[in-house]
Amino acid sequence: MANKLIYFFGKSKTDGGGDMKALLGGKGANLAQMTKIGLPVPSGFTITTEVCVSYYKNGRKAPADLAPDMEKAVKWLEKEAGKKFGDVKNPLLVSVRSGARDSMPGMMDTILNLGLNDATCEGLAAAAGNPRFAWDSYRRFLQMYGDVVMGVQKKNENDHEPFEEVMDALKKEVKVKDDTEFTAVHLQELVKRFKKLIKDWTGKAFPTDPVKQLEGAVFAVFSSWMNERAILYRQKYRIPDEWGTAVNVQAMVFGNMGDDCATGVAFTRDPANGDNVFYGEYLVNAQGEDVVAGVRTPLAIAEMAKDKTIGAAHKELNDVRKILEKNFGDVQDFEFTIEKKKLYMLQTRNGKRTALAYVKIAHDMVKEKLMTPEHAIKSGDPEALNQLLQPIFDTTAYAAATKEGRLMAVGLPAGPGAASGSVVFTAGKAEELAAKGLSVVLARIETSPEDLRGMIASDGILTARGGVSSHAALVARQMGKVCVAGAGDIEIDYHKGTLKCKGVTLKEGDHISINGTTGEVFHGQIATADSELKQVLVNKTMKPKDSKVFQYYDFLMKLADKYRTLGMRTNADQPDQVVNAIAFGAEGIGLCRTEHMFFEGDRIIAVRQMILAKAEDDRKKALATLLPYQQKDFEGIFRALNGLPGCIRLLDPPLHEFLPQHDNKKGQEEVAKQLKTTVAEVARLVSELHEFNPMLGFRGCRLGILRPEITEMQARAIFQAAAVVLKEGIKVKPEVMVPLVGFKKELDLQMEIVHRVAGEVMKATGKKFAYTVGTMIEVPRGALTADEIAESAEFFSFGTNDLTQTCLGMSRDDSGSFLPAYQGLEIIKANPFASIDRTGVGQLMKIGVDKGRSTKSDLKIGICGEHGGDPSSVEFCHIIGLDYVSCSPFRVPIARLAAAQAALRHPAKPVSAKVIKDSKAKTGATKSKTSSK
Ligand code: ADP
Ligand code: MG
Ligand code: MG
């Protein structure tokens, strides 16, 4: 490998920096950055992610230069630290830490105190004048190395960790409760037993040579990139396998040398609600993972100020808090250790936060000028905005539960929102019940990465142990789960399958309710209610000025609107949906499905009459009954739109969807009665309309072409509604959309009818209104012949649901039986019905856009498939130059943020003079993409 394999950070030099996350991993880049800005960071070096990538490319073999380069790096580190690796008098100890580009909490394992063996341990004891500390460090090292490198691990979810088991046995023997009570002699005995455990499990002796130890640890970090937990995590967060992880080797500092030492983690602000308070926890006389692992209950960071021995470090930490926010421009989640009263910084990264904290922090830090508005937009997870719509407890039910004394315990509010459901104690059970459609609350003493699947399946997570930095809290923040962590009063017994508290015993499956905003745990069910955001925007039962959440959200959305160039529309079929969508920021309708209206009230009778009528006259009669209904619906929609554009699709689904099928004899009897005919006749007609592949059958514009009177009725309803609403003084912008067009002629035939009817209505009503007629591009032929179709169409809208089905030759409804396996095998990376398959379907879209605009350079193009609300798909739509996306009302905020992010990630390329000249030659200037806004 030609590139540099190793980057240093230390007193004498620092090669890397905060902007090198891709190469050095998040941890390594930020360690370098903290060193550069003068924060106290123990020296070390980072092996780049490229080395890991090359390791996997070459069948798990490291590049030849790695060993000699590492030797040099260790020499350098020895000089920096003034200690020598393997020195029996004053040994250098190091930590070996993984670190991918994005932090993957708890996924990769760290090894501390590397360099210890029987001889160096004695040396460390003498040098520190503290044998207990030396033996404690040694036993920790054996534990971590044995686990991570040598594979001494528990085999089942409910087993105890083998090392913990050995340690617990010794605790019992020598009658101590906490590991801090072990004496040096105890710990020496523990070291002996740990070595034996390793030998017994693996048949191999523990390596004593520090260089061998380091080698083993580095490769273990590389290997952990491909462990099951890491892979699962990457799948969930769509982190590519190809990134690889860096390895950080860093001189140890010790938080376990006595009561003037500590280790901790902190957030510069509260990551659950975004409050501007210093937030964190620490443990005196402890090392590394102790705080996170919930071995002992940590203290809140504020307590440190009162500590006589290490109180000064609290002040220092407060300064660090400000320095970090100023330098990194975001809330930081950092790790520190205090060795003999001296503070050392061991890690910092942008803090993961709940959606509530995200909008609050963005609002506050942008106003405080600590965060750039661009970062506020870029750093958000659009999908997570859903959390702001998550239910809270219904006020009355909540008060009743409290009054009834159903409150069992209070833990840490680790993930806002309310969850009520069946309590389960294992991840497997959580998955099983969730698959049956039940609401589940997963209760664990504490969670670990093995519980991830169960946590994903649950509505809420409850733990008995662990603080804000515990695994449960971390994951809850990231996944937006309702979570109460460390509810210390509850007792969970995995073997009995019970949860006990205050004399109440819940068995698996019993109801439990948790409030992740307050930390309360109730037994029994509690009804939930709408979030504040819904109360303000949808129900209008709360005023904007009374909701802080709304104000933060609104600030962020307005910021997003400044950056996005994509227009925002909604898929809505009813006036109330339109009103909601506009409240969420929609600027028009991208898809109004007319057939949804067919099912309301007794309209369905007329629909069925229309379908089953044999003579054209009968059909027209039925349609005439339908017309006023449709017109009223459109009037409502135009009023709700209040001048915004409304794209209405002509009838699309196969007709049999409106009829009772053969397994519904009762339905057929009813229809026979309604239509004054026989059941046999209805059954015969249903048979006649039966299709083997309705998705590819008599539907879309094919209906309107063979039964033009349907299109005529719908066009009339649209335009008469437009005239009526226009008369009321409300502007209307109808867009008539013809579905499933693959041939220009199909569109032409339909357009002829629409234009004729428009003319007739204008004449009859004396009202002139502008309207456009366009088409959905949703079959491959439509995309491939878009240049021809654009000769007629005034706009395109990609129907990516059907386009995906027809491009892939996969029916969405039947894909459930093989898609999961396909994803497992990585034939496809993401579900193509959720996120646009860019290379396949995306290519058709790109062809559609390019060909369409080659005919009409200002052709308006949008998307109305469900992909319009998926952040990655929104980004793709931005890249290929669509004018707008359209999605369901509640996904509009998500799409708004995603569109702003896309605009920041892919700024418009400056248009070259030639392109401008060319496009002017055709139909005027290059398109401004804000035209639909
Ligand atoms: P993770 O990626 O899981 O956060 P880290 O590499 O940050 O793992 O290591 C976990 C903990 O180990 C750190 O929070 C820190 O307390 C401790 N640690 C790591 N390196 C050192 C070191 N050089 N000196 C002292 N403690 C360390
Ligand atoms: Mg860490
Ligand atoms: Mg379609």
Image (cartoon, rainbow, N blue to C red):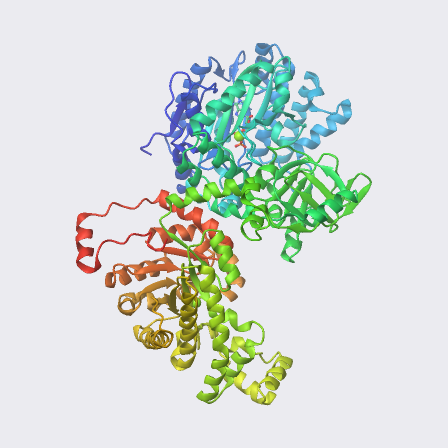
Position of residue 673 relative to residue 518, above or below, is: below
Count all numbered tags in the image, as a single digit. 0
Vertical arrangement, residue 596 with respect to residue 908, above or below: below
Instruction: State the residue lying farthest toward the right.
Output: 503
Residue 547, given in percent of the width and then of the height, sits at 57, 42
**Would residue 821 be visible to someone looking at this image?**
no
**Point 51% across, 59% down: residue:** 577
Q: Nearer the viewer, residue 230 or 147?
A: 230
Measuring from the top left, give residue 576's x and y in whole percent: 53, 60
The residue at the point 69 percent across, 24 percent down is 179
Location of residue 412 (image quadrant):
top right
> Can you tell me which quadrant of the image ligand 1 is in?
top right
Quadrant housing residue 786: bottom left
Q: Position of residue 917 (x, y in %)?
A: 17, 53
**In this rendering, is residue 362 above or below 683?**
above
Left or right position of 478 against 587: right
Horizontal side, residue 62 vs residue 526: left or right = left
In percent of width and height, residue 617 lies at: 45, 88
Task: Name the foreground residue: 318 vs 598.
Answer: 598
Quadrant of image for the N terminus: top left
Toward the viewer: 424 or 213? Answer: 424
Q: Residue at x 56, y 40 (%)?
A: 477
Q: Is residue 496 above or below residue 834?
A: above
Decide if residue 506 is on the left or right side of residue 646.
right
User: Is residue 906 in sight in this rendering?
Assistant: yes
